[in-house]
Image (cartoon, rainbow, N blue to C red):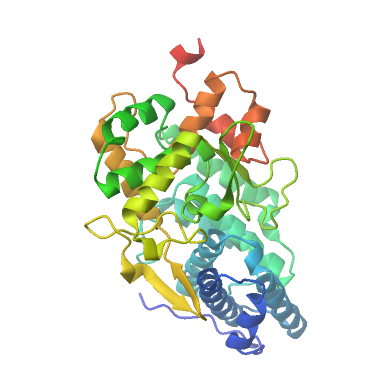
Amino acid sequence: MTLTPYSPGTQLVSQLPDEQFVETVTRRLTDPRLKQRYAELVTALRSELFSIGAAANLSTEQIHNANLGIDSFLSTATGQSPHSLRQYLHNFRFYRRWCMAKNIPTLPITPFHVSEYLEFLESKGRTKALQVDFGKSLKPSSIASHLSSISLLHQIAEITDITKIKRIKATMKAIRNTAARQGYMVHQQSPFRRHHLSELNVIWGDSVKPRDVRDLAFISLAYDSMLRESEMANVTFSMLSRSQKSGHYTGRISHIKGSYDGTDGQHGGRFQVSSHTYQLLVKAYEMTTDESDRDRNGLLFFPLTKGGKLNKRFVAEEQGVVYRKPLSGKAVDEIFQRAYDALLPDDVKSPWRGHSARIGRAQDLSMDGKTNQQIMQIGRWKKADMPVLYTREQDLDELF
């Protein structure tokens, strides 16, 4: 089926040129690598939002407000994580394509069409009603993400958000209940526990292979610190300081999920690293870099050559600053996959992935008698939802 865009009588007017606007948005960022990442996302989001606006059916006054709303939303884009911005971009594109296929305006949208869209997301893997391949059917959590993005579009355009009405809530409830009846459950990644780390130290601790030592250092840091994937990929030695009292190390990340100002009050951006893990980090860094490549402000983890050295293809220079490309989410998963292949544990259901150490550490802390509040503080959670989710699936014989 050919996608035919809806053609309203009015269009969004042009704003500042992309380059000038993007430069204004990213002016506070000093890291060239991070600045480029945000610049690309803001440019793509701006283009997509204007495309959505071009397919809307808004009055002249509403168009004026939408223009202001788009610039207002994107002007604070660096206050959100790149992952969140990528998710918005994906959802916005998906929604616009569906509206084009249905030949309806993107905004305003009726409650009927919102419900129809959600039901389409639920069943698109089992229907060819639109004769358009949007991929497989989505899980309830992903459908809820798409609904939140439609809500955000209403907020950006400053028009009444109809996604909060009773009918839409009832549609989401029906989707979740249907999934539950069909056996759908929210599955978390397999936990990487303390005993797994001990066993891995036995296997890789004396290895002379740089990749083995690097992987062990990475996983040991992930377990100690409970950092998220994106946070792990950006750790440097300059973040770490030694405690004279304990001999261990404290790190501080410049931002954490949900707080990009580094002032997250009670929980802060602090994380802990044992002296053993720190020594592993030093050993891995020395094995994977030449002396001329070492920099306390440079990333601790980066792509390696087959020989286990820093891959120079992933080193760049911009505006006189040399920086390394961080490990991708796929590369992080591969590190945990190699650990799984090395141990072949019989107490986990599936190979470990990027958040496995964070989950496993939360479970170990729970078994050690730490309260939920303490786990939240160590893991830098603002709400109890995630630590409760991570610890609720522990084996019953552990909790009995």
Q: Which residue is drawn at 64% across and 68% down?
A: 77
Q: Disc count in the image? A: 0
Decide which of 14, 53 is in the foreground and name it: 14
Q: Quadrant of residue 101?
A: bottom left
Q: Which residue is drawn at 27% across and 42% down?
A: 338
Quarter of the N terminus within the rendering: bottom left
Decide which of 91, 161 is in the foreground and name it: 91
Decide which of 386, 277 is in the foreground and name it: 277
User: In this picture, is 7 found above or below 119?
Assistant: below
Give coordinates of residue 164: x percent, y percent: 69, 53
Q: Is residue 110 visible?
A: no
Q: Which residue is drawn at 68% across and 70% down?
A: 73
Give coordinates of residue 19: x percent, y percent: 58, 86
| Horizontal side of residue 99 vs 336, given as left or right | right
Q: Residue at x 39, y 64 (%)?
A: 293
Give coordinates of residue 21: x percent, y percent: 64, 83
Residue most toward the left? 306
| Horizontal side of residue 198 vs 365, given as left or right | left
User: In this picture, is 255 found above or below 160?
Assistant: above
Residue most toward the right? 61
User: In this picture, is 297 found above or below 381?
Assistant: below
| Horizontal side of residue 292 vs 225, given as left or right | left
